[in-house]
Image (cartoon, rainbow, N blue to C red):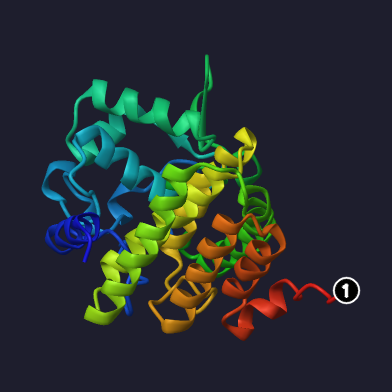
Amino acid sequence: MSTLAHTMMTAARSADSGLVGPGELDRYPFAEAPGADRVGVPSWDAADPELGRVGRRSAGSRGRGLHGQLVQQLGQMIVSGDLGADRPLVPEEIGQRFEVSRTVVRESLRVLEAKGLVSARPNVGTRVRPVADWNLLDPDIIEWRAFGPQRDDQRRELSELRWTIEPLAARLAAGHGREDVQQRLVDMVEIMGHALSQGDALTFSRADAEFHSLLIQLAGNRMLEHLSGIVSAALQVSGGPITGCDRPTEASLGHHSRMADALAAGDSAGAEAAMRQLLVVHPEVERVVPAPREH
């Protein structure tokens, strides 16, 4: 085993996993729909008790500070529909509900505003924005949707988006001559192979995510590079049989290996074909995006 493979596998086994596994689709607690006792005002008391004081909740926060945890919790509540569109968000109420300072609330709302989830206007205050205004390509929103009531739509949309991005990236990446990146792709395949033989799904997933991110970087298209985070988010929240990357299998490993070989050989058609085969390991995908016709 290479030094890189050993280091990555050791680090993955000792780290706290944020990746979804079987039976973990509901790992984020979502509140029941707020009651209608106060029209237009969030019913904080209806929220799940686990969302109580921000500082007490460590599960799902992945080591974030108070500011990051509040963004996470408010974001989940908005995306899940617990805080519906055009509802006012009163900073004082949020601070009291989650027992955080005005500064933490203010900075958290600014982050949510940058994601398109809320808007702040003079004499109107801060309100939740409709779904059409959200930045649906934001990795946090992808994650929140993937583990909320919109999980099926989110996974289908991510699968369709990957079908648009990754075969093209594989075709463009072939023969670019970046030996360092090519070697890194080979290293990731090696790591995936060792992880598969040891039943280490976490290491396999991390090497898989890096493989796809590297491939998009190798394509040499800066606009595509900006989409690499979407692909990484898609791999981390898949949680179901959507593509061949979702679970470690010999078939998935073989497609990655053939893709790396085609990229090194400058075989653009072969690299694209291997990517398409990888994305259609499961028949569910064929109902979303039909397989390309043979010419």
Residue 77, compared with residue 158, is above or below; it is: above
Residue 21, compared with residue 57, is above or below; it is: below
Q: Position of residue 38 (x, y in %)?
A: 43, 46
Question: Quadrant of the image for the N terminus?
Answer: bottom left
**Amino acid at dot 1:** His
Q: Answer yes or no: is residue 30 visible.
A: no
The residue at 41%/30% (across/down) is: 111
Horizontal placement of 89 versus 282: left or right?
A: left
The residue at 27%/72% (across/down) is: 195
Q: Quadrant of residue 75?
A: top left
Kindly give the residue lying farthest to the right in the view shown: 295
The residue at 75%/76% (across/down) is: 291
Q: Answer yes or no: is residue 7 visible.
A: yes
Horizontal placement of 93 versus 124: left or right?
A: left
The residue at 14%/61% (across/down) is: 10
Kindly give the residue lying farthest to the top in the view shown: 122
Horizontal placement of 272 versus 88: left or right?
A: right
Residue 187, compared with residue 96, is above or below; it is: below
Residue 48, compared with residue 72, is above or below; it is: below
Q: Quadrant of residue 272?
A: bottom right
Q: Nearer the viewer, residue 196 or 27?
A: 196
Question: Quadrant of the image for the C terminus?
Answer: bottom right
Q: Nearer the viewer, residue 167 or 19?
A: 167
Instruction: Give the labeled residue for mark 1.
Output: 295
Q: Position of residue 55 (x, y in %)?
A: 13, 42
Q: Position of residue 175 (x, y in %)?
A: 62, 49
Q: Quadrant of residue 156?
A: bottom right
Under circle 1, the secondary element is loop
Q: Position of residue 247 (x, y in %)?
A: 40, 76
Q: Residues within 10 Å of mark 1 (few under 14, many from 20)?
A: few
